[in-house]
Every structure is written in C-alpha cells, then in structure tokens.
Image (cartoon, helix red, strand yellow):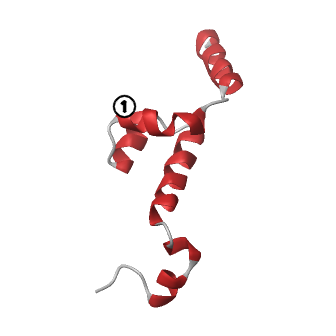
Amino acid sequence: MYAFTPDQVASPLAGRPYDLRHAAVSLWLNAGVHAPEVAERASHGVDVLLRVYAKCIDGQHETANKRIMEALTT
C-alpha cells in the first residue's frame, strides 16, 4: 500500500512533503496555538520547535502587547 496516489506523487506538493509540515506548524503558531501544543502535534520538543520556528513568529510585538494588556486589565 502506498501513502500517495501516482497523481499526488507527480504533483508539486509531493516534491517536498516536509514543506507542508513546516507550513502547518507555522500556521498553528501564527494562529496563536501555544508552543507546547504545537510541539506535541509536530512531535518536537518545545526547545526545538522554538529554535526552528522562531522566525515565523517574529514580528508579533503588537499582538503580544495587546494580549499582555488585556491580561493585566481583566
């Protein structure tokens, strides 16, 4: 039994399946899913996850500040 059909293997998506995994992990982090949850789903340790994917969550200072302020005022 094969994981992909012949058409899937011939598609650009099958060229580097790791790219799909990387895209999913990046999406989860940018969607605000907590790092320990993402790490578990990706079978990473949190330290590895943050080292590899830190660049994809860079630049979210305003969002972080807003969340901190909301937490302080509730």
**Depth check, front residue: 70 or 8:** 8
Farthest right residue in view: 62
Quadrant containing the C terminus is top right
Q: Is residue 37 above or below residue 42?
A: above
x and y, in percent, of residue 13 in the image: 55, 72
In the picture as drawn, the residue positioned furthest to the top comes out as 72
Q: Name the residue beneath numbered marker 1.
A: 47
**In the rendered structure, which amino acid carries the disc numbered 1?**
Asp
Q: Name the residue located 46 percent from the left edge and 89 percent from the top edge.
A: 6
Q: Where does the image place residue 73, in percent across and percent down from the top left?
A: 64, 10
Q: Residue at x 46, y 66 (%)?
A: 17
Viewer-nearest residue: 35 or 47: 47
Quarter-of-image position of residue 31: top right
Q: Which of 68 and 25 is in front in this view?
A: 25
Q: Tally the numbered discs.
A: 1
Residue at 32%, 37% (x, y): give it.
Answer: 45
Residue extending farthest bottom: 6
Q: In the shown orientation, is residue 42 left or right of residue 58?
A: left
Query: Within the image, what quadrant is residue 32 found in?
Result: top right
Q: Is residue 41 above or below residue 21?
A: above
